[in-house]
Structures are given as C-alpha cells and as structure tokens.
Amino acid sequence: MQTVIVPVDFSETSLNAARYAVQLLTGHYGVNMILHHVYEKPSQAEESHQKLEDLKTSLREYGIVKIELLAEEGSGFITELEKLARHRKADLIVMGITGRSPIGQTFIGSNTLKMVEQKVCPVLIIPADATYQEVKNVLLTSDFKNVMAGTPSVPIKNVLKPFHPNLHVLNVDSEHYVAITEEYQAEKIKLQEMFSEFNPQFYFMGLYNVDEAIHQFAADKNVDFIIIIHKEQSVFSKLFVKSHTKKLAYHSSVPVLALHE
C-alpha cells in the first residue's frame, strides 16, 4: 500500500478510525496517510486546518506514520472523498462507523456505507468500539461461485501483503451437509492458488444465519478483520451482500474490509 485516506469530521467515531489507521500503518514504510476533512464555509478553513494539525500531533502517541493533512471546502462529502481517492489512486480508505441509535450516528458513520458503494477502492470500516490488534488472522467470506471473476484478488492481496496474516476462507450455506460438492471443491482449488502466499485455510458451515455464523467464527479464530465482497450479478445478490455488509459493519467490533468484484 502507498496511499491510505482517513476522512475525519472530528467526531469520536472518526477519531477512533484515525487512531486505528495509525497503529495499522506504523512500521510499513512508504505509506502516505492522508487525513481528509471537508468543511462547508470559507470561514471554517482556518479552524479546520488547525484541528487537523492538532489531530496529527495527538496521533504521534499511537505510532509513526507519514501523515499529510488536507482540509478543503465542499458541499458534498462523498463527492470530495471520491475525487480525492481517484486523483491520488488510493489503495485504501479507513472510515469509522457506529452502531448506536440514529441520533448517535455521526456524519462520517452515515456516509461510510455510501462510500463503499462508489467502488473507488477498498474501504476498511472501523466500528466505534474497535481497538487495534496486530493483524494476524483475516477472514475472507466467499460464496464459492465463479471465484476467478468474482474475487478482487489484487486489491485484497495489496492490503494483506504488509501483514502476512493467516487467511481463513469461510462459506456459510444451509445446504452443506457431510461434504462439499464437486463444484465447491473446484472453486476451493482456485481460491487456494489465488491466495497461496497466505496459506489459506477453508471452512464450510451448514447454517442458516450467515451473520451469526460469521460473528461466531471471527470470535473463535480471533479474527482481526473480515473481508466481504460486493457482487453485481443480480438484484438479489446486491441486496443480500449489501445487507450483510451493513449488519457486519454496524454490529461487529471487528473491522470490515469491503470491496467490489
């Protein structure tokens, strides 16, 4: 990774995401972390720049990372963030989210899932109560359907390579019984080759409640973040994956890395 953007609105949710990002990136040289803030009125420019400077100073106690500050005027947060990500060819966006009541959900939190939909680059969603843990175990969820076309291996490996984690590949399907089908076995072999450098381990769970299964698995394996892939084949698939991303992001204490196929 070379460029990581962390948007902040100075809410505790976004500040926690910034702290997490610094700890995540410390020790990985060559990475440029951009603290990005969008303000609405010219009169807010000076205060916004000062707040970013103060935040940069406070982040030093969490780690050492090259940090660039960018405060800009704009009326559309998502629009400005998307433009920045495309212009700077960002490898990752780190954003906070909160599962509290709608009143407690911050501006950043409410826009996080909207940013995922822009398909600009991977978005690492940091729950409000998430604390940084060294990245040792990563969970990749997969439907095991046409994995060559439906798995964005390059951006996933780009995020994973600095950490060299154990990769756990999980499929939850109520139709799994004693053994997986030949089709699943064939897709498993493709994924094994795709992520061979991470020595992937595969798990097939025959359960109906996908979200509960993922949460339980993440707890059992001490997972440090969960990867979920948005697919575009059908309206059903889009709604299904979007729904699970939202549930995982809002109700998990484990960060969720969201990507598009």
Image (tube, rainbow, N blue to C red):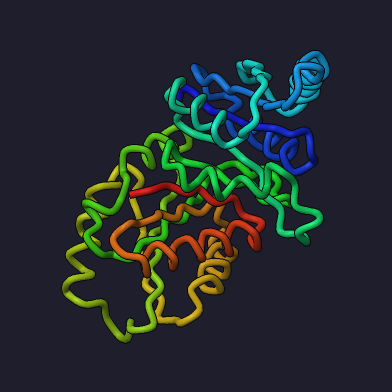
Q: Compared with residue 195, is residue 42 higher up or lower down, i.e. above or below?
A: above
| Residue farthest toward the top in the current orientation of the protein | 46
Q: Give coordinates of residue 253: x percent, y percent.
A: 66, 56
User: Position of 231 compared to 49: left or right?
Assistant: left
User: Where residue 130 sits in the image (x, y, percent)?
Assistant: 69, 49
Does residue 34 appear left or right of residue 122 in this picture?
Answer: right
Residue 221 in the image: x percent, y percent?
A: 53, 61
Q: Tell me: 69 left or right of 200.
A: right
Place of residue 151 in the rendered image (x, y in percent of width and height, measured from the top left): 30, 51
Task: Work out whether 129 lies above or below 251.
Answer: above
Q: Could you tell me which residue is drawn at 18 percent across and 71 percent down?
A: 183
Give the left or right position of residue 242, taking residue 173 as reference. Answer: right
At x 33%, y 82%, the residue is 176
Q: Residue 44, located in which quarter of the rendered image?
A: top right
* Front residue (pair 78, 113): 78
Q: Which residue is at the front of the view, 106 or 92? A: 106
Give the residue drawn at x 49%, y 27%: 83
Residue drawn 37% across the image and 38% down it: 155
State which quarter of the image contains the N terminus: top left
Quadrant hosting residue 14:
top right
